[in-house]
């Protein structure tokens, strides 16, 4: 019966399936018999895309991703909200004014010898160049995450998406790993104005060190990062033994994984760890950084994931029915990253997509199969069953980890 309804609708892309009662979707659709409609906010505008397209390490990734989401007709399933760039004052709710003033100054200076020792002190230089436009694109990306978080706080939606956010390495007073402004920390601080316990989940290939550092000493924000951990691999932090300090002891979770990790192991570990996190921390809101540099085919060439496991992780978080903020991050095979975040957007909007990518402006990037799905490479998954078992056991059996407290609504909200 559902197949009869795969009719083409004038206002949807040819591949866009209808839902059970024949509608092509849209926020005013009354959907019977499906998961209760989750209102989804998608942060986007022409200015936002053109500014985020200038992020040096992922040129035009913002527009390329948006174009596939649009080609599949997914915009009609979400409410599109235009962001503003984050202001200096908003950015300094986390970052030091000295660092941000230095970043602004260097981005306006076109002298190749501008990197003085102050620049070095703030991590600005050859590995994190402060080129013209870096401050603008970073403040627009951060504005997108703040807008998304504000939509959740004001109750306008249950899921909010900023695929141009997720810059998890930036520190309070330094740039790192091509991250200049930590939009994730700013978004979490915004969510904390309403929610007492906020969970951060990071499924990027790399350890989410900047977010972990920001909240390692508080029990109000738990950070959970799944990442490749091996000698010499950036940033080098995020071992199992890294569990938080002071009042935050037990509220930092790190899941170190080895080379070649594939979907089955990745999702198995994710589900086991998150089951425990849900019980012990009982979050009121969750932020997920969906970095796609762990995908097969990424030039990072480290993990061997497909979009299926990353989408399943987000699907899992949706079942918690708490406010969910979805962000981008790494992802340097740009067509695969666009495939991944389109797949996740379809999961969040409850939309089945054909795997044939519709014709659109960047269609040629998806050849020769023009398929939404990707295949794993044939590199071995070096995460042995005993490694996986050991990681899960160490997290679930640790006494200090997220000491299980009865969460009584407290009027003193700060630690
Ligand atoms: O993706 C990251 C950090 C990436 C990073 C950190 C520290 C040093 C270098 C990098 N990034 C790269 O090496 C990089 C970035 C973009 C594209 C490439 C490519 F050359 F592999 F394509 C490589 N975090 O989630
Ligand atoms: Zn990464």
Image (spheres, rainbow, N blue to C red):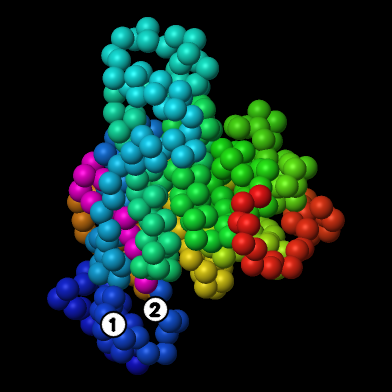
- To which residue does mark 2 refer? 37
Q: Secondary structure at mark 2?
A: loop
Q: Which residues are magenta?
A: 39-50
The front one of 374 and 205 is 205
Q: Is residue 127 visible?
A: no
Q: Is residue 404 visible?
A: yes
Q: Position of residue 200 (x, y in %)?
A: 57, 53
Q: Is residue 346 magenta?
A: no
Q: Do tag 1 and tag 2 residues touch (Cβ < 8 Å)?
A: yes
Position of 238 relative to 134 (above/below): below
Q: Is residue 377 left or right of residue 366?
A: right
Q: Residue furthest front?
A: 411
Which quadrant of the figure has residue 68? bottom left
Marks counted in the figure total 2
Q: Which mark is residue 29?
A: 1
Residue at position x 21%, y 44% in the image: 47
User: Badge 2: how crowded within 10 Å, few (<14), some, or many (20+)?
Assistant: some
User: Badge 1: how crowded within 10 Å, few (<14), some, or many (20+)?
Assistant: few
Q: Residue furthest bottom?
A: 1
Residue at position x 37%, y 10% in the image: 114
The front one of 272 and 84 is 84
Q: Secondary structure at mark 1?
A: loop
Q: Which mark is residue 74?
A: none
Q: Position of residue 1 (x, y in %)?
A: 35, 92
Gap in Å between the C-alphas at discs 1 and 2?
9 Å
Residue at position x 22%, y 69% in the image: 13
Q: Is residue 264 left or right of residue 367?
A: right
Position of 278 relative to 3 (above/below): above
Q: Is residue 263 left or right of residue 337?
A: right
Residue at position x 56%, y 38% in the image: 210
């Amino acid at each position: 019966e559902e197949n009869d309804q795969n009719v083409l609708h004038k206002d949807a892309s040819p591949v866009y399936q209808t839902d059970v009662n024949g509608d092509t979707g849209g926020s005013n659709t009354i959907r019977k018999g499906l998961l209760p409609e989750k209102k989804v906010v998608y942060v986007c505008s022409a200015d936002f895309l053109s500014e985020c397209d200038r992020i040096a390490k992922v040129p035009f990734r913002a527009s390329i991703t948006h174009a596939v989401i649009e080609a599949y007709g997914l915009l009609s399933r979400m409410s599109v909200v235009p962001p503003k760039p984050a202001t200096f004052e908003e950015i300094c709710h986390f970052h030091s004014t000295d660092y941000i003033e230095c970043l602004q100054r260097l981005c306006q200076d076109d002298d190749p010898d501008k990197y003085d020792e102050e620049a070095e002190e703030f991590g600005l230089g050859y590995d994190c160049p402060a080129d013209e436009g870096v401050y603008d694109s970073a403040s627009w990306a951060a504005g997108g995450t703040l807008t998304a978080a504000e939509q959740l706080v004001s109750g306008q939606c249950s899921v909010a998406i900023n695929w141009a956010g997720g810059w998890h390495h930036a520190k309070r007073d330094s740039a790192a790993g091509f991250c200049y402004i930590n939009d994730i920390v700013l978004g979490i601080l915004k969510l904390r104005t309403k929610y007492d316990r906020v969970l951060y989940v990071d499924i990027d290939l790399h350890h989410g060190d900047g977010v972990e550092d920001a909240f390692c000493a508080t029990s109000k924000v738990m950070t959970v990062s799944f990442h490749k951990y091996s000698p010499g691999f950036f940033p080098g932090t995020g071992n199992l033994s890294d569990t938080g300090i002071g009042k935050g002891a037990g509220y930092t979770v790190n899941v170190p994984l080895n080379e070649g990790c594939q979907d089955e192991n990745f999702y198995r570990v994710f589900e086991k760890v998150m089951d425990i996190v849900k019980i012990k921390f009982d979050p009121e809101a969750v932020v997920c950084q969906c970095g796609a540099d762990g995908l097969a085919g990424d030039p990072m060439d480290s993990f061997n994931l497909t979009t299926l496991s990353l989408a399943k992780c987000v699907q899992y978080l949706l079942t918690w029915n708490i406010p969910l903020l979805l962000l981008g991050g790494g992802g340097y095979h740009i067509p695969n990253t666009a495939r991944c975040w389109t797949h996740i957007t379809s999961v969040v909007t409850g939309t089945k997509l054909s795997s044939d990518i519709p014709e659109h402006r960047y269609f040629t990037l998806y050849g020769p199969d023009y398929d939404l799905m990707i295949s794993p490479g044939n590199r071995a998954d070096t995460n042995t069953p005993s490694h996986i078992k050991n990681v899960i056991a160490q997290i679930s059996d640790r006494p200090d980890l997220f000491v299980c407290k009865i969460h009584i609504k407290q009027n003193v909200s700060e630690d």
